[in-house]
Amino acid sequence: MTHDPHEHEGHEHAHDHDTHAPIGAKEPEGYYPLLADAVRELLIEKGYFTADEHRAFIERIDARSPALGAKVVVRAWTDPKFKQRLLDDGKKACAEMGVDVVVANLVVTENTPAVHNVIVCTLCSCYPVFVLGRPPDWYKSAAYRSRVVRDPRAVLKEFGTEIDAKREVRVHDSTADMRYLVLPMRPKGTEGWSTEQLEKIVTRDTMVGVAECRLAA
Amino acid sequence: MSWGEGIASRFKPGDKVHVAERYPAKGHFRTPFYIRGKTGVVERICGQYHNPEELAFGKYDGPEKVLYRVRFDQKQVWPDYHGHSADKVEIEIFEHWLEPAK
Amino acid sequence: MHHDMGGQPAGPVNTAAHEIEPWEKRIEAILRCMQLRDPPIVTVDELRRGIEELPPKLYDSLSYYERWIASLTNIMVEKDVLSRAEVEARMAKIKAARAKEAA
């Protein structure tokens, strides 16, 4: 059973024949999925939600992907007035494109020749799921959360991204009600490209800020 | 940017602010350790939101608090920072964690 | 407060992805069902607080969604939405039913 952290404070005991493992030890494989199934069944029986509502949420989240963000970025690249609206109020501008920003607001940070932006949530894993889909494992990892705020250039290098020493690197720690999207720079050599071609080079990593857009994605 | 419109905020963009050096033993806080005690500049007012410190304990109807984005120089935050001297970190911080900087 | 880790030393970032599993998606959807009601039954803030209250060793050894379901369960027990006894009983019931099916 999931342990009440206050019950056995400071009291480590050897594993015994009881089904409860010592505090701080992970339960055997299959335990947490089984726990999830039991909890889901009970909540449905108690009337908190229906199986259909639950399934609908999975489908809704599955439908989100970085392709949404790429559409927003490419519109900003090709429509300067939209870009300004996006920078002023990310939520309103995304709504124009049918992207529902379910959170309080979206801060869009623009990469320029002078500034490179990168996003993190050091405290947990806050991420703009509504426009990028689920966050990658690395974004939620202790290594990323610990290091990118303190040594962003070294962490970016691990992603194969090197920011010129003369450019400013700006880290955004997503600590409260805002969510963040990086507006990457449009690479030279893409003049005259179609929307589809442009969207292909706007990857998730470029919108989190660990990569820059390249001609060949 | 109009997110601060109509809000009675203690600070405005451009104000120099100091993050409180409080280390409560218990509770849920969204002001990371690494920024407590540091001085930065208000970048924008984000709006007013319920206090996560209360939401985390089932109190959903407390007063809303003003939330800011505050910009800090990395070389002020980390004594051994290697990187461009202009590098920044920007964080959302609630008003009750901020004091005017001297 | 173990979760507040900005600036702590750590190794290189592992950029490998793992495909999210159906059980993980089901956990995420449980939170959304409970959170996106007016008023919410559980907030994302309570979820976070529950995760932060996990003993550090457990926090480190659980995967991301394992932390979610551990926290969610603890929070819901705290709020009398569920009891530990009924959760344990249901887990045993499901396990027995599956074993029977497999036999």
Image: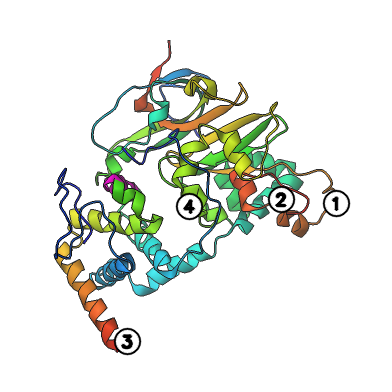
The CA distance from mark 2 to mark 4 is 21 Å
Q: Classify mark 2: helix, strand or loop.
A: helix
Residue C88 left/right relative to A107: left
The residue indicated by pointer 1 is: A192
Q: Where, by quadrant of the figure, is residue A185 drawn?
A: top right
How packed mark 3 is, by other alpha carbons closer than 10 Å (few <14, some 14-19, many 20 or more), is: few
The residue indicated by pointer 3 is: C102
Disc nearer the start of the sequence (4/1): 4
**Labels 2, 3: front one:** 3
Disc nearer the start of the sequence (2/1): 2
Q: Amino acid at mark 4?
A: Val
Q: Classify mark 1: helix, strand or loop.
A: loop
**Labels 3, 1: front one:** 3
The residue indicated by pointer 2 is: A74
Residue C19 left/right relative to B52: right
Kindly identify the residue that appears in the image at 49 percent across and 62 percent down.
A61
Q: Position of residue A88 (x, y in %)?
A: 60, 37
Q: Amino acid at mark 1?
A: Gly
Q: Classify mark 3: helix, strand or loop.
A: helix
